[in-house]
């Protein structure tokens, strides 16, 4: 592993450090500063010639600044003759812009994929993209990991429930929830958000049978939690017994803490793909770490071992 | 329109001719032949210098041969100094390969998008891609039309039903069916294809309320109809009143004719994005034409008028 | 001019509006918003098919967000089939990162040039890049205008002085000041910032004759004004009669307002390439507008007239 | 050789297996299937991360399907992080489309070279391209082997003749036959296919002296054998003693078997660059194997030894 | 034609001027100079924004300097916002490097095609490339004209002969001579340059019947004329009645004038694709002009008329 | 070092040989010849498969021919499967064309950077580019060395002076001289070349204090020495005690030898980045070798050691 280096931008420093711990190496040093005109300046502080370099950076708030940091770090590494650069993006937020559902908008997920390449990335390592097809936006090899088995395994082991149903917050999430439900071997339901009649505007309609069951809401990310509040109300009206929620990316922005607390959801199980500040941590929130998963993937990318094996047969992972 | 030319490969000659009729121009001539070693040979038989050229070709059986035809036609046009080449692909079949759901497979939808560009396309005009994100696979402007309002309008006008529900054949189709249901202002349901218990293997589970309703199954394409047979049985067991099906692409390959006839579905409403041979046409099958839609889009692309307007406000189109 | 559109990002809205006034057209509408996860979302609100589109955006604070806005606007325009996209960047701040003066840093000016192209720009229109060679970072046509004659003409006409000398704030600015001095037909001097002896650390050394003269300090930008304070002190020690300063880009960030007020410089003549908030405007600060210059250039780019003529023979411009 | 993998498409499975035997490795597994809509689906069944991968596929009937297979296999390998992909194309059929001898046609040989690269190939290994210049169509390293010495050596050793002449079937083949004749140290002749007088339409004219000699016809490929029938008649009329034919690629399509049998040519010496079905094998047909040649080239590409040495001094090869 | 501009490098100034005369426009001005360090400097002296620009330059001695001139002229035009740049290369000398006939050499014809594009060309217009496949080296549209009918028509009309034979100077030229012979409706022969027996080293062997006929030697270019001297001797020994020679490119370098004079060839018919200095002009040398042909092609490229029509049906052109 | 190869073009053969001596390897063989039509032909005479290859070539007279040599050598190496190609360009002359200081000219430094890449270079190794920003013209890693400390160290050790001043020959050189002056810890001055008054046309004006001091003129290159003659006269008039000159590139073209001899400059200290013929060597000229510097850099590039360390802390190098 002597020619392997891991760097990090400002978005996930603690995750990057944990990854390094799992790899048994030190985080490589770099210096990020700003000129008085707000321009970023990056200095890589270790020799990277002919090294296999990984740069950890999630696209979290301030998103554009963090993305630009990643671009400039990679450009510095490339011009410093790194042998290969892998952008490790645990949370690739612009993946939500994956289609053109209004005229004259940008499919920004694709734009970012192109810019990441232009800025110097040779590969990408990421977790639970908003939709699987976003993988195809990249014109370089992508290792697309999933934390779904990790979350499913945690819920399976630590949460008590007899009759459960996996719930998607909208029709677009049905496929993701279908996979999640398969891991837990439970049925599924979806919230159909359309306006059905004039008097039923803000409420979604529950498609599927949830009455007297434990509803395990599942989504790729929790951001402000605003839609979640509505979803929880809809499910309560539909007569669920209790609620749990799982999501890979705990973005938790804006009024998230207050919104989450206001619901009857017993537990929110997320991962650390997004850095969560201490003040947001509550008993209601369980944070699982993807550091072992990312460390294992980095090791295998570096040595040329199969990553597919990690996920074969839909088995729950050993982490 | 004097500098506008429309050519066609072998896959949709009658559709191409109808498009030209709507545009008030003649189909431009080309000659496709094969050398004795099975290599394709294309001769463009009209001057295309500085012309705005559209090539119509669906990716239908034999798929690879039809795709290669498109590539070679576009290469011939490009080297003959066409000003701009738009690949008009009413049915882009490889869009179904839009993700990596097994290790070491190709996201062939993206590969095709890249090859289409390399072969000379400057733009793409297509209809109802398998998933919206496939739009983002292309690194050139794409006009992605939809025939969903066309089909919804037909069903609304010509089919009789009081209480209806739109049904997705699997979780992955939930989003598409959600939009379709919105057009018709009816609720939705989905078939959850997972194996729930050991004794219920081949049957899907209906998520949502379908009992005593007219089930309007909706999908992007009907290929062999095999899954459809299973879906119809599942819905019958769930107590639907009767069934109708809508789909943009009537691929109708293999045992499709027999399979469709064997179900209790009253009507299959599809479009002519795929050429349907006469022997497959039955009373059970209604074929709507996308020729007016494509002709209008081609005219607007050529003259620089907005195409977004065609679909604004989710209104049904005037065709 | 009917196929000409001007859009603007958030950085220079008033400048963009003035440009449109000079062109006799309306600013084209677009909508920039943020999702709850801090991702930008751009909707272009006018048909741009086959239009010749210009997007005005300076790289001002918050720099990375403004750059990303430009990228996403251009991507939306490109996918909406704009015929040609010109990025109008009155202040291209990353141009200062134009060399590798430390190991393992990024030449970010070049990186930005590459990303601007990748995001959809076909041309660039800019003013007074930090060094002339930055023009060569772009792999597309660049119209590189200068506001130096504008500033020189203003000083010549409105400021009184008998014996003047143009002063560069460091050796790197000597060439720029040489040109400026030539416009005014006065000699030049430079501040040599190196440490000459151990006891003379923070002070620069004046190279050239400034005693009893009006020193006209000239630079490409004024950011915090911190170095300017030192320069003014150095010049005062060297016995100048009085001081004026000219600079194209009035970045005026951080403690700029206080710093400028603390010096004995009588007048700061800048332009509006950077938007200057009202509270920063004082009698000491004269802001000239580049709107007529940019409008004229946009008109000529659109119609194919020469822009070189605008600057021929080193004559002061007619604006 | 532990990081060397050889895969094969459907066109030359037995050749690929023989190559592996010569290399002392096993053919790596992959699975090619078709979806019901005729779309190809490829699953690579071995870990290829950081491996040096070779994919064997000739462009034989069905040509377009075989080419697409190669593209999709390479795309799957690339996205599975293969270190380097070499397309081994023993018979590159589209090389015959190497010029624009009519207006508005495609130089499809060049198009295929571009698509092969876009689909993921880093290198190409091929044998006896239709013209040497086709090598220049590729924008990546090509190892262009020749089987001419192999065929010449066989004829020299196993066929009896005293006075022989090498014959080109048309003027375009003169150069190839010139080289072949040089290997055997015999004179050459060509068939000039033009219409010389009004009464001599279908017959070619023999340029050169063939009377009472053994004519050794040489070409790059034998496809239907139709032109060969005419050539043999022309040579018979010109008084040759007897005839032998050599060609690298035994395409043998259409009525080839019947056509070959109908001529007085004693022996056809070809190689196995194209898979020849058993029913086409006759005493008249001698098939030499290029497997040792390809295996040796693959070994040298993998280890970095010279391939040029294999052909130095125009010597016959040791295989 | 008001937006059409023709520029020229230093290689063919008189040809460029004649082309302009035929087009009824003035040659556009530019200035080529050299800095003291031998670096070229080009100043374009006319506004070319949005213009359709053609640059005439043959690759004649000093070849590398003339090529670099073309590159720098095109780069200046591109950065000056020319709308489209067509490199008009009447004699593309590196086309002779079109294959790899020795290990580790460059296929320089392809390299030049790539560099021409990189330097800014959008199209190429050229005449009689050494081999037809060189057309395929370019990744942009090429109009590949031929002067063969021009030369054939001249010989047919002005030279007297009863029984003639077209002669290729080596096997590689057989195809070109085949076409030439077809224009004149005469048979062909080739000189086989290989060493047949130990005592016949330097002489070639005549393949075909030339005795008592007028030999019309045909080639793409005449450079030093050294091989021609040998060819003429070989043909004389073979008993030809008399000799004429045709070639598109009269390179006439080194001892060409002396060599040509030393042969018994009565007339050399060439064109002005290469500038021929006055001192090389003799009664033995007939120079036909390609200026009308190039002017017509430029006009058609500019206006979008067919160029293929110029050569249809193998008819002699009207120039 | 067994997989390291160094080749050279015709421009710096002795320097390349010295580099090899320092590396302890032999210069790898290649053969450069010209066809009769002045086209270059390169044959690489050593196996380079999977080798790490460096090609030494300065851009010296005849510049265009030497550049083309480099292009063709690299293309041959690339197609011969070299693993990595580093263009070692000790003197990159076109770097002087680094801006657009007149309308419609080429920024040829950027054009050359692009062509070098297109021709096959993966990296560049160069010394003292005319301006630091030229580094940013390259879209591949560049190791940009400097010989300034080498020259400064020589002057410091071998030349005697008490009060010295570093002099830039024009404002554009101020920055370079600033760095040089910092190495020697002396003040600086510049020659301001503008016409100040009507009677002072050809003379420059000295900005800074040079009276009675040793003027150490410093520039990046000495070409004809013409401006140097003027500079020396200007400095003499300004009362300097004596003069020394340092420059990295001793281009010494045209009347350089005579011009240098005609000045009162005591010593010219240059390096061997440009090959200097014996007849130009005089006692006045001291030539330092960059061979150790380049050899060390090549070694570090090959093995992946840091090159930045060579220049850290502004220390004089150990060579």
Image: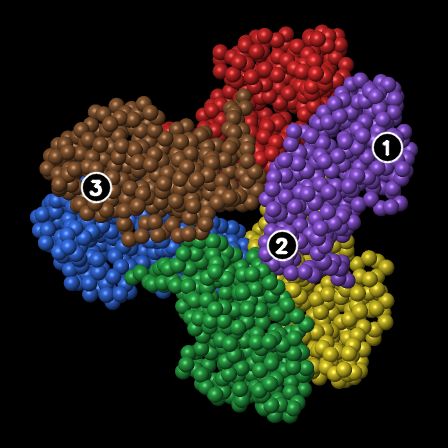
Chain colours: A red, B purple, C brown, D yellow, E green, F blue
Q: Nearer the viewer, mark 1 or mark 2?
A: 2
Q: Is residue A282 above or below residue D177?
A: above
Crowding near the residue tagged with mark 2, few <14, some 14–19, many ≥20 C-alpha atoms within 10 Å: few
Q: Is residue E313 above or below residue C72?
A: below
Question: Which chain does the residue under circle 3 lie in?
Answer: C
Crowding near the residue tagged with mark 3, few <14, some 14–19, many ≥20 C-alpha atoms within 10 Å: few
Q: Is residue D290 above or below residue B155?
A: below
Query: Where residue A255 sits in the image (x, y, percent)?
Result: 53, 13
What secondary structure is found at the residue carrying circle 1?
A: strand
Badge 3 and badge 1 both on one subunit: no
Where is mark 3, residue-wise? C156
Residue C146 in sight: yes
Badge 1 and badge 2 both on one subunit: yes
What residue do we see at 42% from left, 59% from top? E73
Q: Could you tell me how far apart the alpha carbons at marks 3 and 1 are, in whole angstroms?
A: 84 Å
What residue do we see at 28% from left, 53% from top? C313
What secondary structure is found at the residue carrying circle 3?
A: helix
What residue do we see at 65% from left, 91% from top? E162
Residue B196 in sight: no
Query: Where residue A262 sits in the image (x, y, percent)?
Result: 59, 8
Residue in front for this viewpoint, D215 or A282:
A282
Where is mark 1, residue-wise? B267
Badge 3 and badge 2 both on one subunit: no
Where is mark 2, residue-wise? B3
């Amino acid at each position: 592993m002597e020619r392997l280096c891991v760097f990090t931008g400002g978005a996930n420093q603690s995750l990057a450090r944990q990854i390094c711990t799992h790899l048994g190496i030190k985080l490589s040093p770099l210096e990020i500063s700003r000129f008085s005109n707000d321009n970023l300046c990056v200095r890589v502080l270790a020799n990277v010639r002919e090294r296999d370099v990984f740069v950890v950076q999630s696209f979290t708030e301030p998103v554009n600044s963090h993305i630009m940091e990643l671009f400039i770090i990679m450009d510095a590494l490339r011009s410093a003759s790194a042998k290969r650069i892998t952008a490790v993006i645990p949370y690739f937020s612009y993946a939500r812009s994956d289609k053109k559902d209004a005229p004259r908008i940008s499919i920004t997920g694709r734009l970012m994929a192109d810019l990441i390449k232009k800025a110097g990335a040779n590969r990408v390592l990421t977790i639970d993209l908003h939709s699987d097809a976003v993988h195809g936006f990249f014109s370089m090899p992508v290792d697309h990991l999933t934390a779904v088995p990790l979350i499913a395994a945690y819920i399976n082991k630590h949460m008590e429930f007899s009759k459960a149903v996996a719930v998607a917050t909208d029709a677009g999430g049905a496929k993701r929830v279908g996979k999640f439900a398969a891991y837990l071997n439970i049925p599924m339901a979806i919230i159909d958000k359309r306006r059905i009649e004039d008097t039923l505007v803000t409420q979604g309609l529950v498609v599927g049978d949830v009455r007297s069951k434990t509803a395990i809401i599942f989504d790729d990310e929790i951001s402000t939690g605003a839609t979640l509040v509505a979803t929880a109300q809809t499910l309560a009206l539909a007569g669920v017994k209790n609620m749990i929620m799982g999501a890979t990316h705990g973005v938790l922005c804006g009024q998230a803490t207050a919104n989450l607390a206001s619901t009857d959801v017993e537990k929110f199980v997320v991962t650390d793909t997004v850095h969560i500040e201490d003040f947001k941590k509550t008993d209601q929130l369980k944070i699982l770490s993807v550091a072992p998963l990312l460390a294992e993937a980095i090791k295998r990318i570096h040595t040329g071992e199969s990553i597919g094996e990690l996920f074969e047969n839909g088995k729950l992972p050993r982490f």
